[in-house]
Amino acid sequence: MTLAVRVIPCLDVAAGRVVKGVNFQNLRDAGDPVALAARYAEQGADELTFLDVTATVDDRSTTYDVVQRVAEQVFIPLTVGGGVRSNDDVARLLGHGADKIGVNSAAIARPELLAEIAERFGAQVLVLSLDVKRSDRTESGFVVTTHGGRTETDLDALDWARRAIELGAGELLVNSIDADGTKAGFDLELTALMHELARVPVIASGGAGKVSDFAPAIAAGADAVLAASVFHNGEVTVGEVKAALRADGRIVR
């Protein structure tokens, strides 16, 4: 059975507002998360991803009230990430309307967190969020970053993805920091490498600039495509992306 390709708008949220920058820098206001969530649901989005992009940097929890207001507006799966450090954080977010939880920096600091979340809530709830940069310091040529792309680790991105899946991650959200916000297209090499190693779904993120950018990411092995600024700016709609994927022979909902 071939699964339908998913199209996922992303709400990068700081101080209760959706923001967007380039390479995670120079963030600018992009609108109200509740209004944008409602718009994307109407357009036919398969899921939404809500990332509190400053929670880890500010050493605080995710903004629960904003998550709840977004969840109340949409009836599609909602993934929430940012500042998740414990099972209690996961339970609280699920209680505020999240369906899946994205974990990044805290799992790198303590990988056992992934196993703890998967054991208590199930792998289907756990999304490993990978912010990846190209680097000549690792064997694969890709390194994992934390704190919204601000801090490079010593972790090879492919090695970390393999370990995270073994620990219980049920999905990989692979964001290219190099491509993020550039609108130059997804990092197809990174997407293909992640697809080759993963026995779980891979979401390609970072770099979408036009309708024709999405199909190549699926061809490279992504199970879903995620984008932010092209949707926020109204340059591309979810429906247009789905039409292009359908024209490319992909199954979409």
Image (cartoon, rainbow, N blue to C red):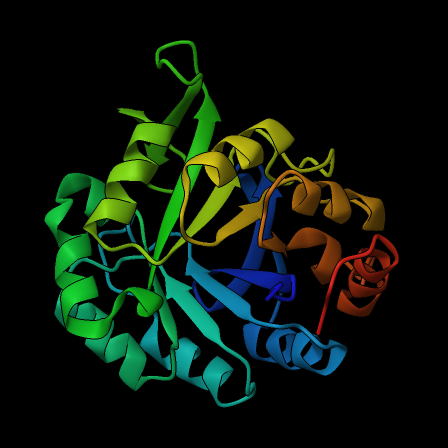
Query: In the picture, residue 125 is in which quadrant?
Result: bottom left
Q: In this view, which residue lies farthest toward the right?
A: 247
Residue 136 visible? The answer is yes
Query: In the picture, residue 145 is in which quadrant?
Result: top left
Q: Position of residue 1 (x, y in %)?
A: 59, 66
The residue that appears at 65% across and 61% down in the rendered structure is 5
Q: In this view, which residue lies farthest toward the top?
A: 136
The residue that appears at 39% across and 77% down in the rendered structure is 99
The residue that appears at 75% across and 77% down in the rendered structure is 43
Depth check: give the residue in front, 145 or 232. Answer: 145
The residue that appears at 37% across and 70% down in the rendered structure is 100
As drawn, 9 above or below 106:
below
Q: Quadrant of the C terminus?
A: bottom right
Q: Position of residue 223 (x, y in %)?
A: 58, 54
In-image side of 181 versus 83 (left or right): right
Query: In the picture, residue 65 is in which quadrant?
Result: bottom left
Q: In this view, which residue lies farthest toward the front?
A: 1
Q: Position of residue 37 (x, y in %)?
A: 60, 76
In-image side of 141 versus 34 (left or right): left
As drawn, 245 above or below 33:
above
Residue 105 visible? The answer is no
As drawn, 92 above or below 119:
below
Q: Position of residue 199 (x, y in %)?
A: 40, 48
| Number of marks | 0
